[in-house]
Image (cartoon, helix red, strand yellow):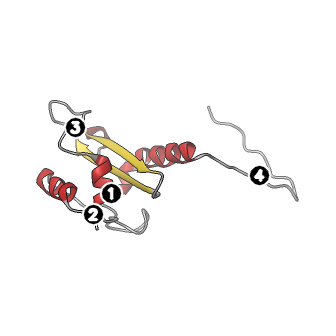
Amino acid sequence: MKKNKKELEKDKYRVIKISKEALWEFIYESIIDNQDVFFDISDVTTITSHHDIDFENGNYICLIKSDTDDRPLRLTEEINLQVLLNNMEDTTESLYQDNRYKEFSLDEIKALQSKKQS
């Protein structure tokens, strides 16, 4: 249901203040709504996405995977997004530039997870 837009009266301000949980929801939903753009995917119905956030350090991670496996909606137990989030370098400085994401095999992800934090 689309709402009618309202004109902003002169000398009035509109403010949005949200909690960290609402911020997480916004990030999560924005990534899902735009995963075709952010991950260069032609058919988003063929993938599942997995997300995590570290509020303490202000970091977010999203991992997508082809959902053609036997158990498409589950993330393999060999991948721990919290560990990957803590051990991995950022893949991009901005979601609006080319080369936002990196592709990894399961072995490469496991190697990143086992990397000692400095």
Name which residue type carries label 4.
Arg
Provide the residue designation for mark 3.
67
Q: Position of residue 45 (x, y in %)?
A: 30, 38
Q: Earlier in the sequence, mark 4 or mark 3?
A: 4
Asked whether residue 42 is in view, the answer is no
In x, y percent, where is residue 1?
Answer: 61, 31
Amino acid beneath label 2? Gln
Dot 3 crowding, Cα within 10 Å, few <14, some 14–19, many 20+: some
User: What's under tag 1, amino acid-wise?
Assistant: Asn
What is the spatial separation of the Cα atoms under label 4 and label 2, in whole angstroms? 43 Å
Mark nearest the camera among 4 and 2 is: 2
Cβ atoms at labels 4 and 3 below 8 Å apart: no
Q: Are marks 3 and 2 in contact (CB under 8 Å)?
A: no
The answer to the question of whether label 1 and label 2 lie on touching residues, with beta carbons closer than 8 A, is yes
Residue 88, image quadrant: bottom left
Residue 97 appears left or right of 23: left
Q: Is residue 17 left or right of residue 61?
A: right
Q: Is the residue 29 above or below the residue 105 in the image? A: above
- Pointer 1 residue: 86
Task: Please tell me which residue is depicted at 77% across the width and 45% down the height of the picture.
Answer: 6
Q: Residue at x 56, y 47 (%)?
A: 20
Q: Nearer the viewer, residue 44 or 55?
A: 55
Kindly report the distance in space between the C-alpha atoms of the residues bearing marks 4 and 3. 42 Å
Q: Is residue 112 left or right of residue 62?
A: left
Q: Position of residue 3 (x, y in %)?
A: 68, 37
Q: Residues within 10 Å of mark 4 (few under 14, many from 20)?
A: few
Residue 117's mark? 2
Q: Secondary structure at mark 4?
A: loop
Between discs 1 and 2, the one toward the N terminus: 1
Q: Amino acid at mark 3?
A: Asp
Separation of residues labelled 3 and 2 (CA atoms): 31 Å
Q: CA distance from mark 1 to mark 3?
A: 25 Å
